[in-house]
Amino acid sequence: MGPLVGFVLVSRLPPGPRALPIIGNLHQIPLTKPWLKFASWSHVYGPVTGLRVGTKPALVLNDWTAVSDLLDKKGSIYSSRLLMPIVQRVAGDHHTAFQAYGAKWRRSRKTISDYLKDTELDKRVAIQEAEATQLVWDLCQEPEQYRDAVLRYFGAIILASVYGIRGQWYEGGYLKRFFDMEEQWAALFDKGQTPPLEFLPWLEYVPEWLTPWRGWRRKTDDLQKLQSTVYRELLDSTKKRLAGGIGEDCFLAMLLKKQHVDGYNDEELRGLGGVMLEGGAETSATTLLTFLLAISAHPGFQKKAQEEIDAAFGEDQIPGIVDGNKLPFLKACFLESIRWRPIAPTAIPHYTTQDDTYNGYSIPAGTIVIMNTWALHHDKRQYDRPEDFNPMRFIDSKFGLKDATDPRDDTRRETYGFGAGRRVCPGQKMAEDSLLSSISKLLWSFDIIPRGKLDTGIRTAFKDALVCGPKDFALHFRVRSERKKDLIQNAWLEANKFLERFE
Ligand code: HEM
């Protein structure tokens, strides 16, 4: 009897909606904002929901303790990725974020993490500071173009620190071409323009005209060509500058210098540069746009943050390096933006490499594991009125929780917006530095006022995209005083001089 009970208990996935043969639950998973559906399923089936995606088993983790138990504590078996044929077709196998768990991923992950560790980042703060000053200056000049200015800011930080090149915003320039490419990537995935080959591989052999994905081969091949051209030109530019004795301390120059001693080949270097741009620019820019939406919709919190910044830096000094511990309300605004509207609501799905059991259910090797950050951050059992943007929750309690007495808190992450386990975002500190640097300068410089009524609803005001940010909304950036405007101009002249070394 005993072994039989054991078998019954561990022989199936956690409960979830009924699956059909071949397609599993694919027909029930919405193409847009699927994490909202996952969150509603968790109320029916429990915090860990079992699904079938095509013929593959999948788990959705809607609860932080499950994320801690599986992704964080069992990282050795929960850290792979399901290989995605479309990504492979465009990016080859050089994209760290999509590589399977193994030697290749470990090597590139270590290279990136070494470059993004705290002591290394401290050396690059000057770039972030100068670019944030450029951002504020750009907004003084062309406030209505604030989206472009924000994209440029984060793209330029990566361009300078990874390639040693100054990021300027003009038609045909690297940054515009890069962000156009990002839009093409998004169009491939977000609008269902490609078949889900990772779940239903046989679709590769079905003639396109018989499917809803007409032209998918041409679109992916076009993007592949465009991407390899841009990344090749960027690397060539770094090489040229290095040969001329400039830009020696950027990420790729350092790797180029080691190329002949067991280093990366050119193709791998192009991939690594691309990963940094793709991982770091749009994610951070979307987080700042979300913050701008939130803070302009909540003038009371905006004023409170301005008071904290003014008290720390004064009327006569544009904020310099920001230490989040010394500006607790600013840090709380940053954490609350990410909690309220995480830009990657399902992170990047993990994939298991060994059989496992959890709470009596079986999780076979080859299970897709989706962390539903949206559900974690909007868990009513944990957060008071989770739908509200309220930075005070992070002042009143360490993790923004309504009941700060959970005995397991020592294993909780400050935020799940950057993923979890061994695949957690290696750029979290860099993102935090560049966001706090820009937010403090923006709020010191401007009152940020909505033009007209703002919509902040997740279903209506946010894009149906993998990187989920706000749709267009109109803002007015009113400089807070003439004196501040003069100081911004002076600071910009200095920043511009510093940034000229990347031209
Ligand atoms: C606010 C900004 C950012 C957000 C919200 C963000 C979020 C994320 C998330 C959710 C993941 C997936 C984690 C998982 O699989 O569990 C990730 C992975 C990654 N991020 Fe970020 N990220 C940000 C900024 C950056 C920056 C600045 C860089 C580098 C310059 C970066 C580089 C990467 C890389 C390389 C990976 C892949 C890691 C791997 O698969 O091992 N990210 N990021």
Image (tube, helix red, strand yellow):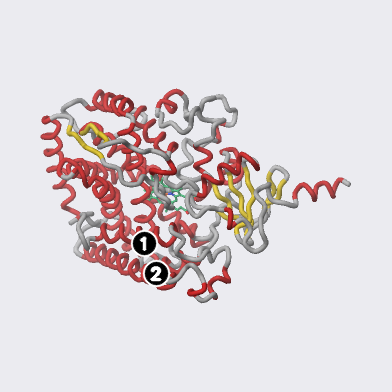
Q: Residue at x 14, y 29 (%)?
A: 481
Q: Residue at x 27, y 36 (%)?
A: 452
Q: Which residue is labeled 2 in the image?
A: 219
Q: Which residue is labeled 1 in the image?
A: 184
Three-letter amino acid code of the residue under disc 1: Gln
Q: CA distance from mark 1 to mark 2?
A: 9 Å
**Residue 203: x percent and y percent?**
55, 70
- Using residue 55 as the reference point, say whether residue 237 is left or right of it: left
Tag 1's secondary structure? helix
Three-letter amino acid code of the residue under disc 2: Lys
> Where, quadrant-wise, is the C terminus in this rendering?
bottom left
The circle on residue 345 is none
**Residue 254: x percent and y percent?**
32, 58
Compare marks 1 and 2 and give the one earlier in the sequence: 1
- For disc 1, the neighbor class at 10 Å (few under 14, some 14 to 19, many from 20) is some
Quadrant of res 405: top right
- Using residue 450 as the reference point, say whether residue 266 is left or right of it: right
Q: How many numbered circles are shown? A: 2
